[in-house]
Image (cartoon, rainbow, N blue to C red):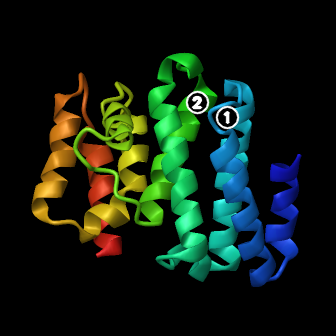
Amino acid sequence: MFVEGALSLVRAGSQEQVTQLLRRMSTLVSGQSEALSAPVWLRQASVRLQLIQEMGIRFPELIREGDGAAGFVRDWLLSDLQRCAAAALVFGAGEQTTTLRYRLVAAAAEVGLPLTGAGTPESELLRSLLQSPQQQDQLTALLGLRKQLARADSSLIALYFGVLNEGTRWLGGDGMAVFLGRLREDA
């Protein structure tokens, strides 16, 4: 209930109130995430993503700063990404779970959370998303990462394309054209 009620405060509260809310919620998230059942956790992770999106609209500086509120947001995203990666069998392959994974990856890329550390849970989650047999899913994952890729060196971009080519299917010409067009927009 507290998590859902926080949306109202983010939409109508002051920046100071939102920062205090982030502190309280971060304590709550760190203490509960492992104990929650999968359906409850999925719901709360979805609401946290909504909070991050609302904060990004109302107080973008809170999301972009290196410490403080932005640190809390990064911790949430990292925790949620790791739980998604660790509990893949618990959550199954449902549409809600898959959508949440793509949204988490896109939000993490948007706030600059590194997703490519070798062998980390978040990089393995990203790898599994990029290797999805559905082209639209691959495009969605890549578009969420386009800002990170636009700033990356050529070896990192080669890694993403290499991951795509390891999959059973990879983006066709139309999907790749959309992706490259979006990369150019960000450059």
Residue identified by numbered label 1: 42
First in sequence, mark 1 or 2: give its number.
1
Q: Residue 25 carries which label?
A: none
Q: Residue at x 53, y 20 (%)?
A: 93
Secondary structure at badge 1 equals helix
Q: How far apart are marks 1 and 2 (CA)?
A: 7 Å
* Dot 1 alpha-carbon crowd within 10 angstroms: few under 14, some 14 to 19, many 20 or more: some
Locate residue 126, reporting x and y percent: 36, 40
Locate residue 162, reporting x and y percent: 15, 40
Quarter of image, res 69:
bottom right
Quarter of image, res 180:
bottom left
Q: Residue 97 carries which label?
A: 2
Q: Which amino acid does label 2 sit on?
A: Thr
In the rendered view, would you say 142 is above or below 168?
Answer: below
Q: Residue at x 35, y 49 (%)?
A: 142
Secondary structure at badge 2 equals helix
